[in-house]
Image: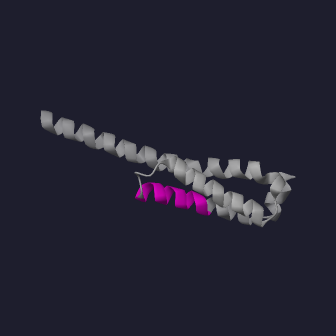
């Protein structure tokens, strides 16, 4: 039933892709803001989507899918920024010892 809903409302996949791009971009541009805030914001947008298309039965699965798929780029960007900081620290420590 959920699969049929998602096939008929293909705009959901576009919504998820846009939210993934926005999640990665916002977490890169605003690294001090916690990731949880972005995920909750995107879940609220997804909740609005389910209300707009009158899909009350599918609210929880759609919220879960949105949260999971928008968390992926956010986590990847945060991990990349973390590795950049670690690399800078290692470079600074090796330049001091030489």
Left or right: where 7 falls relative to 48: right
Is residue 1 left or right of 32 when viewed as pictured? right
Q: Is residue 66 magenta?
A: no
- The location of residue 36, given as percent across then percent down, is 53, 47
Quadrant assignment, res 44: bottom right
Q: Left or right: where does residue 12 sit relative to residue 87? A: right
Q: How many marks?
A: 0
- Identify which residue, 56 or 76, lies in the foreground: 56
**Residue drawn at x 75%, y 48% as measured from the top left:** 60
Residue 96, percent from left and from top: 14, 37
**Left or right: 78 with respect to 17?**
left
Instruction: Name the image quarter holding residue 5.
Output: bottom right
Task: Indicate how the structure is coloured in the image.
Answer: one colour
What main secondary structure does the magenta stretch of the protein show?
helix
Depth check: give the residue in front, 14 or 44: 44
Q: Is residue 8 above or below residue 58?
A: below
At a point 70% along the width and 57% down the height, the residue shown is 47
87 lies above or below 22: above
Q: Measured from the top left, where is residue 58 in percent x and y?
A: 80, 53
Quadrant in the picture for the C terminus: top left
Q: Residue at x 81, y 59 (%)?
A: 55
Residue 38, compared with residue 88, is above or below; it is below
Which span is picked out in magenta? 18-29
Q: Residue 28 in magenta?
A: yes
């Amino acid at each position: 039933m959920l699969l049929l809903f998602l096939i008929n409302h293909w705009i959901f996949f576009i919504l998820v892709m846009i939210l993934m791009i926005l999640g990665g971009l916002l977490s890169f541009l605003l690294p001090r803001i916690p990731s949880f805030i972005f995920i909750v914001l995107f879940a609220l947008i997804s909740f609005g989507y389910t209300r707009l298309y009158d899909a009350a039965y599918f609210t929880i699965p759609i919220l879960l899918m949105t949260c999971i798929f928008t968390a992926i780029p956010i986590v990847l960007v945060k991990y990349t920024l973390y590795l950049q900081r670690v690399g800078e620290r290692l470079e600074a420590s090796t330049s001091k010892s030489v």
